[in-house]
Amino acid sequence: MKKAHSICFSIFLSLLLLGCATKEEPEFLLRASLLVGEDHTWYKAFQYFGKMLEERSEGRIVLQSYHSEQLAKEIEAIRMIQAGVIDMTTTSSLLSNWTEIMAFCEMPFLLKNPNEVEALVTGPLGERINKEMLEKTGLKPLGYFQAGARHLTSNRPIRHPKDLEGLILRVPNVPSFVTAWEALGAKTTPMAFSEVFTSLQQGTIEAQENPLALIKVSGFYEVQKYVNLTGHVVSWTYPVIGEKQFERFPEDLKTIFLEAAKDMQAYERELFLKNEEQIKEELEALGMTFVAVDNAAFVEKCGDAIYQTLSPEMQEIYTSVVIGGQ
């Protein structure tokens, strides 16, 4: 009898363990690669998005998000999405390597504030950007995230373009950034974002430029003393999914996915606005000094350097944005 009880218990335990081991897999397991750290609003928005997707699809869609370029650097992540290896990321002007119009997402000295970003993104130019992104890169935009103004950080104050002479500056691998900063007098070094902190620490580069939120969450205050308020770019980024991956969803999951994406954008916007109010004080408390710059001198020194690199068609669009036509 004891032997029979023992056998029954063993069978019960085996079934219990088997049940735990064969947990039902989701219909669609998505992976997102993000360049920002885990404290950034974009990553938090993707975490929120994943939660909404899993709840609303009743477990049929599961999203795994990886911060700090753990899966891949930004340009590699785009290629991996196109190859079907991963599924999602955030991106913007880096896509100008595929289609020129994407340069408008982060064009130096073009837009002045988030309201102008909103007008561009929701206007005819924004519609064209969405269309070309889909057709020429295979990435489907899911709304957009505000990125805030980009500022220059360094270990010496930069108030005027003449102060840039000899400064080794990391820029993203985007032609308009290279053109603008070289016209201003800096020595540019295109580099993946995940390499920036170590390069600053080792002295391979001397400066970098990014929005305040990214400066903070990336810990640049540990290796940079000054935030020079150049405000040279007011930009945004797109959360994207590969179009092929999206088309694999049945219609009901497409609807769930797109509705959750709208909620993700609203959630990120709320976090962004709250963060912008306090980020400057936080960086000052962490030891950074904010430096007012001669913005007019930067604009004048850059001149029409960016405009001259554009194709005739893009020059027309650039002019229309500058004069407010968009």
Image (tube, helix red, strand yellow):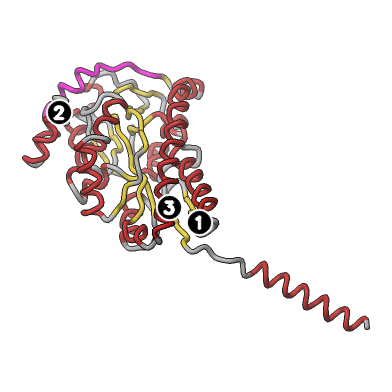
Q: Secondary structure at mark 3?
A: strand
Q: Nearer the viewer, mark 2 or mark 3?
A: 2
Q: Is residue 29 above or below residue 270?
A: below
Q: Is residue 291 magenta?
A: yes
Residue 146, label in figure: none
Q: Quadrant of the C terminus?
A: top left
Instruction: Please report whichever mark, 2 or 3, sits nearer to the chain's N-terminal start.
Output: 3
Q: CA distance from mark 2 to mark 1?
A: 42 Å
> Which residue does the image show at 18% across and 43% down from the upper left?
101
Q: Amino acid at mark 2?
A: Gly
User: Please, what is the three-letter code of the amino acid marked with disc 1?
Assistant: Val
Disc nearer the start of the sequence (3/1) = 3
Q: Which mark is residue 325?
A: 2
- Foreground residue among 161 and 58: 58
Left or right: where 74 falls relative to 44:
left
Helix, strand or loop at disc 1? strand
| Front residue of this view, candidates 305 and 28 | 28
- Graded by Cα atoms within 10 Å as few (under 14), some (14 to 19) or many (20 or more), the crowding at tag 2 reads few
Could you tell me residue 79's position as x and y percent?
31, 57
Q: Residue furthest right?
A: 1
Give, as a single range, the part of the protein colored magenta: 290-304
Does the image show residue 178? no
In the rendered image, residue 48, in percent from the top left (x then y), is placed at 50, 43
For label 1, the residue is: 62
